[in-house]
Amino acid sequence: MSALVASPAEQDKVQVLQRTLYRAAKANPGRRFHALYDKVHRRDVLERAWAQVRRNRGAPGIDQKTLADIERYGVTRLLNELAADLRDQQYRPLPARRVWIPKPGSTEQRPLSIPAVRDRIVQAAVKTVIEPIFEADFQPCSFGFRPKRSAHDALQVLIDEAWRGRRWVVETDIASCFEAISHDKLMQVVEERIYDRHVLKLLSAMLRAGVMEDGVVRSAVTGTPQGGVVSPLLCNVYLNRLDRQWNAKGVGKLVRYADDLVVMCATAQQAEHALGLLTAMLADLGLEPKASKTRIVHLEEGGEGFDFLGFHHRWVRASSPHRHVLFLARWPSDKAMKRARDKLRDLTDRRRLRVPIEEIVGEMNRYLRGWTGYFRFGNSARHFDKVRNHAIERLALVVAKRHHRSRGYGWSVVCFQSPNRLGLIDLNGIVVAPRPFRAWRGGPNTGGERRR
């Protein structure tokens, strides 16, 4: 059976619901919402939840049921069953499947919890209903996993604040944030806005469902498992207490993207004070900064920089002979560059020599479009050249090995015999240099970066 997709009219009804909840929450910051559970199992909400889960794809949970299995079973049938179970309060989430994935650029591994597809649908439905209420409370310093806010919005704040003179930077992230959040404290924060006991019971059940690893189910009293649909929202709900405290007592400009934090300060003393405040505020929440990623950086010409959201940031002087302006530049970090090289190496590995060259090039292009789509908003021209050259080298190596010839032969085929380098996309001319106090995308105030 083909996937069920909500009609535009049904989607509009969900949007109307979300706008209504948001406006009500915004108009009355002290209001606690008590009639929400019936909206979670509304058919249009569940259909939208299914569409989101299907769009995000993902692996099966402990029941081993894939999205394709659900479609064969019947989406309408499953949604009817979920609606009935929720309505009758018979729904029980399964434990999530625990897997460990390597952290990019590190030997560490991080835990990932994969709920069953049916549980992801319910989580998405809950998120659809409660997110607008908490969005009304979230602070401007929060950017991660929020609608209509992106990493580049957060990065633009750094450009603006550095230009204003805040060039002492406190950088850190929260140690094991998703795993360390106390369930009891989290539910207390949720209850500041949600009074519906059925929704609270459902959220509590999701948190207590635990994870299965090596056939053993483990439950915990802390953590919003990474991989759950609703987990990023709950993380933001909990950390909103930090954001509010910072607005009242903090110094400098806080920029938070989920559990990654940067504070822009005007002086070294402010930065030291900000770090102390941040540590104390996190301790009140039962959290702590990750020691290995916590430091204070002074942005100055010739000085060191810092990494944030995949970019390396550094205070530099414009290289044009007619310009002497200093500014905060950014380009892909060393880790980001390594990930790009590793991915291109994997796509052109020896084991794939029998794959048609057109298919390999297509996969390389898809990856490069995604990678450059993010990093093009920066001073990244030289780094794009390096990635492009690496892609050409890897493609030439594939051609050489397929024909049992030298690497020089591969270079000749890719760079000289082919008019378009076998279809590999060009990365020249797509970089957009950020500017202070200007929209980071589109509009007449942005333009391509000069090649330097």
Image: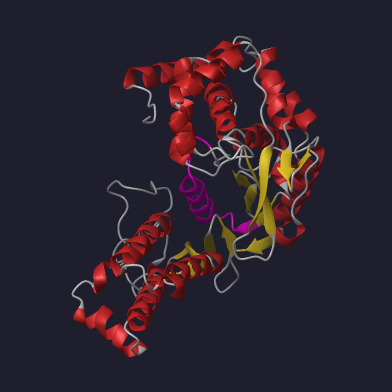
Q: How many marks?
A: 0
Left or right position of 294 against 130: right
**Residue drawn where x is 59% and y is 54% of the image:** 166
Residue 22 among magenta residues = no
Image coordinates for residue 313, horizontal then vertical, percent: 53, 62
Left or right position of 361 against 32: left
Based on the displayed image, in which of its 4 quarters is residue 451 positioned? bottom left
Q: Is residue 403 above or below residue 100?
A: below
Question: Which of these two is toward me, 185 or 350?
Answer: 350
Q: Is residue 195 above or below residue 183?
A: above
Question: Which of these two is toward me, 86 or 21?
Answer: 86
**Residue drawn where x is 26% and y is 85% of the image:** 412
Magenta stretch bounds: 146-169
**Residue drawn where x is 42% and y is 71% of the image:** 348
In the image as oriented, which residue stretches furthest toward the front? 72
Q: Is residue 26 visible?
A: no
**Residue drawn where x is 64% and y is 20% of the image:** 91
Left or right position of 367 against 140: left
Split into 4 quadrants, where in the image is the N terminus?
top left
Based on the displayed image, in which of its 4 quarters is residue 29 positioned? top right
Image coordinates for residue 35, horizontal then vertical, percent: 60, 9
Image coordinates for residue 56, horizontal then vertical, percent: 47, 40
Residue 149 among magenta residues = yes
Split into 4 quadrants, where in the image is the C terminus?
bottom left
Q: Is residue 236 visible?
A: yes
